Image (tube, rainbow, N blue to C red):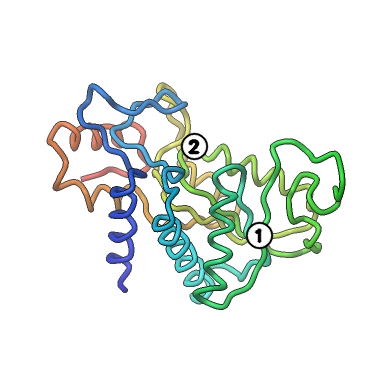
Amino acid sequence: MTETVFKKEFLDMLIKKGSLRIAESTDNLFVFKSGRKSPNFINIGALTDGESLRKLKKAYATLIASLIKEGKIEKPDFIFGPAYKGINIACLATEGLYELFNINIRYMYDRKEEKAYADKAMDQLIVGAGYFKPGQKILLIDDVITTGGTKLEALDKLKVLGDHKIVGLVLAADRQEKMGDAIRVEELSAVENIEKQGIPVFSILNMEDIFSLVKDRLPTEIKKAWIDYYNQYGAVNLR
């Protein structure tokens, strides 16, 4: 399967299952926490049926396995998924790597609040930390990146493990937006800010991929709104 076909099949699934939503008109744009009004919205949490999860597992596992095979990331000892959506994704990716590629690694995830009972050494703040050994490698995984705040919080939480190496960040979609809010637009995108810290970022899809695959079926009004949005907030220009 070529990379283009792989991306198209994944995008078709996101659209079919309601994970990628596109505004019907400029009167009902999606308002983000930042206050930005977008003509599209990606919600991996909408994928809750068996068919969706199977395809999600395959997509993440295939990308991670290829990154390892091509030497773009070191083989991790753990996949870490930040709460909440990242937990299910980390679990699926870990299972998919073993099922499809015979790559057997563990996964970890964080708690929103520290555990104060029972086996605290194993999962007081990071569930699965009891298996961790100093110097081991961790792959961070999540759904979508917009401002990157959740990912930076995850990196900070992982400091509790002590000596470790983050080999990369893998996402379903990179929105390719600059950081900031509706008024303030920063120079760097969320991905550029993370990569500046020496952590390579990879995604199954980015907004350039998505737009190129759907633009010919968009109403003129929404297509223009999409382009205008990225002229204002994007790390890329869409055409």
Above/below status of 100 relative to 122: below
Precedes in sequence: disc 1 or disc 2: 1
Q: Position of residue 198 (x, y in %)?
A: 60, 55
Q: Which mark is residue 107?
A: 1
Find residue 157 and report its image quarter. Answer: top right
Q: Quadrant of the C terminus?
A: top left
Q: Residue at x 44, y 58 (%)?
A: 56
SS under mark 1: strand
**Mark 2 closeness class: few <14, some 14–19, many ≥20 residues within 10 Å:** many
Q: Which mark is residue 128?
A: none
Of residues 184 and 42, the one nearer the viewer is 42
Q: Residue at x 69, y 64 (%)?
A: 137
Above/below status of 23 relative to 53: above
Compared across the picture, whether 143 is left or right of 106 comes to: left
Q: CA distance from mark 1 to mark 2?
A: 24 Å
Q: Position of residue 207 (x, y in %)?
A: 33, 47
Residue assigned mark 2: 147
Q: How many marks?
A: 2
Compared across the picture, whether 27 is left or right of 161 comes to: left
Of residues 25 and 197, the one nearer the viewer is 25
Compared across the picture, whether 185 is left or right of 225 comes to: right
Q: Position of residue 29 (x, y in %)?
A: 29, 27
SS under mark 2: loop
- Tag 2: residue type? Thr
Q: Residue at x 81, y 62 (%)?
A: 134
Compared across the picture, whether 229 is left or right of 80 comes to: left
Of residues 114 and 197, the one nearer the viewer is 114
Q: Position of residue 20 (x, y in %)?
A: 33, 43
